[in-house]
Image (spheres, helix red, strand yellow):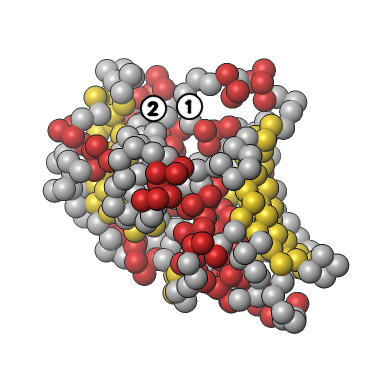
């Protein structure tokens, strides 16, 4: 069976990456691409690397344009998806790459986003531990999916095994992330100009203000079975001059007198059979270059007995595993297709 697809926000980074992955998917027909200010222009004018889609033109993003497809992907700025999802009740599968349907707590939405609160959807991180099982079980045959925030899913995948196994204390997490500017979207912003980011590293959303914090707390609470209020995280992203990528370094205290073997076993048990989330051998740590273009999260684990903390270093491509790849992987599960279809574990080098 071939499924017809519409992708909104198709001129942006997330929309373009969704299209790149879907273009090689044997079960998908990309029928419609939409935008706002760029409507009426050829898709390849804004995504010149998508040569196989050169026949498509960007249409206006309206409920009427998006309706009538088997699958709709929404790659819109936060707070803009809800106005369309409410009107797509007859669409068999809708996947939102924005934040509108990620959070279960309206209080968290009001504090970090504001505007209208929309119902939470199935969270699109298949490998995430939730109550002792993987999130993929919820995604199977899901009709509405919220693709994750790239920083949020990276930190959550980093720490969920240790939190679920009770070997680290989720009440004292510190995460510092090196992040490429493509995670901020394609809109023209002064702080993202080449002259502002080349040759420097710039922290942003410092002091507990980043919008992905409640998403991380929600995910880790689900992994541990504890209230989200019990998850305390100091989260600091740093913008660095690489177009793609996240390198997340997260630490948390070791609980009790668990052994080094028990700590490492938590991550090995969680990800030993996973295709796209891989724990590296002891003493090895990932680089963002190793996951460029891949739907892969590579994890390095260190046990610092002097500080009595576990350090987890995780690398992802923010546009693939962090966003579009997670969305397509979740789509495959929802449709009953092989989970890895049109997704690669292999990065691009040099």
For this view, does 265 lie left or right of residue 156?
A: right
Q: Are marks 1 and 2 in contact (CB under 8 Å)?
A: yes
Where does the image place residue 82, in percent across and percent down from the top left?
28, 41
Q: Residue at the location (65% across, 69% down)?
A: 169
Q: Quadrant of the N terminus?
A: bottom left
Depth order, front residue of 211/3: 211
Quarter where residue 76 is shown? top left
Q: Residues within 10 Å of mark 2 (few under 14, many from 20)?
A: many
Classify 324 as above or below 185.
below
The image shows residue 77 at horizontal and vertical percentages of 39, 33
- The residue located at (79%, 69%) in the rendering is 308
Q: Which residue is mark 1?
A: 186
Q: Is residue 258 shown left or right of residue 147?
A: right
Q: Earlier in the sequence, mark 1 or mark 2?
A: 2
Secondary element at tag 1 = loop
In the picture shown, does residue 262 fall above or below 318?
Answer: below
Marks 1, 2: nearer the viewer? 1
Numbered label attached to residue 11? 2
């Amino acid at each position: 069976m071939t499924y017809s697809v519409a992708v909104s926000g198709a001129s942006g980074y997330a929309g373009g990456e969704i299209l790149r992955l879907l273009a090689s998917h044997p079960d998908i027909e990309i029928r419609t691409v939409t935008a706002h200010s760029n409507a009426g222009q050829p898709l390849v004018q804004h995504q010149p690397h998508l040569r196989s889609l050169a026949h498509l033109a960007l249409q206006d993003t309206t409920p009427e344009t998006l309706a009538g497809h088997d699958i709709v992907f929404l790659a819109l700025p936060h707070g803009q998806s809800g106005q369309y999802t409410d009107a797509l009740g007859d669409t068999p599968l809708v996947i939102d790459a924005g934040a509108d349907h990620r959070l279960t707590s309206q209080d968290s939405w009001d504090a970090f986003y504001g505007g209208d609160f929309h119902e939470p959807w199935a969270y699109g991180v298949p490998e995430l531990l939730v109550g002792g099982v993987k999130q993929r079980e919820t995604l199977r045959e899901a009709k509405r999916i919220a693709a994750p925030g790239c920083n949020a899913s990276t930190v959550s995948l980093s720490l969920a095994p240790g939190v679920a196994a009770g070997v680290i204390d989720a009440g004292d997490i510190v995460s510092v992330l090196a992040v490429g500017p493509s995670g901020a979207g394609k809109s023209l912003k002064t702080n993202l100009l080449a002259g502002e980011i080349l040759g420097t590293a710039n922290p942003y959303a410092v002091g507990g203000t980043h919008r992905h914090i409640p998403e991380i707390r929600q995910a880790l609470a689900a992994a541990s079975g504890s209230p989200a209020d019990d998850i305390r995280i100091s989260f600091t992203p740093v913008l660095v001059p690489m177009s793609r990528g996240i390198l997340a370094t997260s630490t948390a205290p070791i609980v009790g007198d668990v052994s080094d073997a028990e700590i490492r076993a938590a991550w090995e048990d969680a990800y030993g059979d996973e295709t796209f989330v891989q724990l590296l051998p002891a003493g090895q740590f990932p680089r963002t270059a190793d996951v460029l273009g891949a739907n892969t999260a590579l994890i390095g684990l260190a046990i610092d007995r002097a500080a009595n903390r576990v350090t987890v270093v995780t690398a992802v491509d923010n546009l693939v595993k962090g966003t579009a790849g997670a969305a397509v992987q979740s789509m495959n599960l929802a449709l009953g297709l092989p989970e890895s279809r049109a997704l690669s574990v292999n990065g691009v080098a040099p």
